[in-house]
Amino acid sequence: MGQGKAADALAGFWKRVRRKKLDIKYIATDLSAAFISSVLENCPNAVHVFDHFHVVKLMNEKLDEIRRAQYNMEKDINKRKVLKGTRYLLLRNGADIFDKEYKTRLDNALDMNKPLSQAYYLKEQLREIWMQPNKQVAEKVMLDWVKQAQESKVPQLMKMAVTIMAYRTGILAWYDCPISTGKVEGINNKIKVMKRVAYGFRDERYFLLRLYALHDCRITPNVG
């Protein structure tokens, strides 16, 4: 268990891997440059899968950047009112918006703002990369997505296209082994809950012991 997001946070992990002579064939991480470098250095022959939830999250961040930029640029008061408060609707999966009023509000915002509309539909299409029958088809879907993003001329989308191409091997590696960092993210969330419940741990050793026991206990606040 390491602290932080720097490459040295994984030093203990790699030390145990070498000591136990483990042969890691597949590994999943987020898009952290430090983690990517660490995997390449310590596990060069493993298939490195980039967690698809983090790729989608990055696209959501680009979409939100565009939303804020378009809102700030808009001079028409009525249009600003339509754009205001649409963040939740834009970032939510389109298929999960059932409320007719919410859907109408989203459609109105997209109809009046082309860059926002382009970003939203590309966000929706991005998930299709992981919904194909095989890697070859997925690559075609990815390249088509990148082409659309580049042709949009929206700076944030063009930057996202560059990112997708830079990480394409690891993104498509999901088809070699469909793994993610989901379990790790779940543990991280439990750690955050534990820290909130305990209002911070002053004894670092005790805190580590509690972390190792996470899978054996439920986190409950101390009462009395």
Image (tube, rainbow, N blue to C red):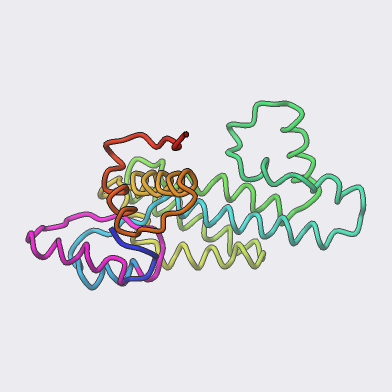
Tell whether position 24 is magenta.
yes
Q: Residue furthest front?
A: 224
Examine the image and state in which quarter residue 59 appears: bottom right
The one of 186 and 151 positioned closer to us in this rendering: 186
Image coordinates for residue 45, horizontal then vertical, percent: 17, 65
In this rendering, position of residue 154 left or right of residue 201: right
Which residue appears at 30% of the width and 72% of the height? 8
The one of 113 and 40 positioned closer to us in this rendering: 40
Quarter of the picture holding the N terminus: bottom left
Which residue appears at 39% of the width and 65% of the height? 4
In this rendering, position of residue 43 left or right of residue 205: left
Examine the image and state in which quarter residue 16 appears: bottom left
Label total for image: 0
Which residue appears at 48% of the width and 66% of the height? 163
Image coordinates for residue 176, horizontal then vertical, percent: 25, 50
In this rendering, position of residue 11 left or right of residue 156: left
The one of 181 and 127 positioned closer to us in this rendering: 181
Tell whether position 196 is magenta.
no
Q: Magenta segment range?
A: 8-34
Q: Residue furthest right?
A: 77
Image coordinates for residue 161, horizontal then vertical, percent: 52, 63
Examine the image and state in which quarter residue 37 appears: bottom left
